[in-house]
Amino acid sequence: MTAPKRVALLISGGGSNMVKLAQSMSGDHPGRPALVLSNLPGAGGLQKAADMGIATEVVDHRPFGKDRAGFETALQAAIAPYAIDVICLAGFMRVLTEGFVSQWDGRMLNIHPSLLPKYKGLHTHARAIEAGDTLAGCTVHEVTPALDDGPILGQAKVPVRPGDTPDDLAARVLVQEHQLYPAVLRRFLNGDKTPVILGG
């Protein structure tokens, strides 16, 4: 049996997806959570990770200002000691440059709260409602230098209901995120890139 892949989970907030991913990586799972890293020292997910016995690191982006390369050099330096195989962005609210992404080509995943290629970027739920969409959802994809681009590894669809606010829709999509991301990660670490599709 091959050794489990070592997974780094990058967060900026409470880390609900990080927790679900970390919890899923047990038993016969092909991965193990080796590191939770945040760009914000006060991110709630850091304490949750520590409580789960996962190593944590912080690389505060704010002292770097507009020096994104400097921030990413520090990020890479913080990750390096952990011998990471795969990175999962789980609510990590920094856009990464080609310089960083290229080092992790084919080894970095992200979850985005829309049915890509629709609604790249921010405010995805409000945009889906404003467009009159009947379906919204979330997508897990490989990270490439282009924002919210890259091969799609899974999608979960959620109905948009009459009278939905962006918060209503976001709450329903988050439930699906917590199912989709762990399912995709398990499949991905087993070398299978067939998309996982949840919901109608």
Image (cartoon, grey):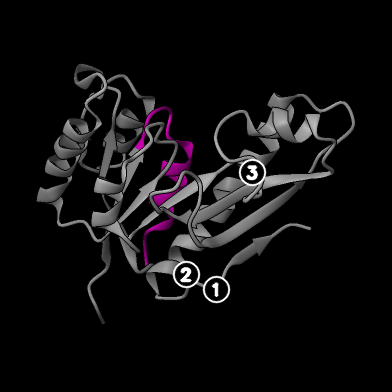
Name the residue rendered at 44%, 65% in the picture: 186
Is residue 36 something that shows in the picture? Answer: yes
The residue where tag 1 is placed is 194
Q: Which type of secondary structure does the marked residue at label 1 adopt?
A: loop
Q: Is residue 13 highlighted in magenta?
A: yes
Q: Which mark is residue 114?
A: 3
Is residue 58 something that shows in the picture? Answer: no
Q: Is residue 38 highlighted in magenta?
A: no
The residue where tag 2 is placed is 187
* Image coords of residue 21 (percent x, y): 43, 50
Q: Amino acid at mark 2?
A: Arg
Based on the displayed image, in which of its 4 quarters is residue 11 positioned?
Answer: top left
* Image coords of residue 64 (percent x, y): 20, 22
User: Do residues under tags 3 and 2 come within 8 Å of each other at their CB atoms?
Assistant: no
**Among the two numbered marks 3 and 2 on one chain, the one whose residue lies closer to the N terminus:** 3
Q: Amino acid at mark 1?
A: Thr
Count residues near mark 1 (Cα–Cα under 10 Å), then give few for <14, some for 14-19, many for 20+: few
Location of residue 63 with respect to 70 vertically, above or below: above
Image quarter where the C terminus lies is: bottom right
As drawn, the residue found furthest toward the bottom would be 1
**Among the two numbered marks 2 and 1 on one chain, the one whose residue lies closer to the N terminus:** 2
Count residues near mark 3 (Cα–Cα under 10 Å), then give few for <14, some for 14-19, many for 20+: many
Q: Which type of secondary structure does the marked residue at label 2 adopt?
A: helix
Stretch in magenta: 11-27
Q: Amino acid at mark 3?
A: Ser
Name the residue rendered at 41%, 43% in the picture: 18
**Image side of residue 116 versus residue 141, left or right:** right
Spatial CA distance of label 3 from label 1 is: 19 Å
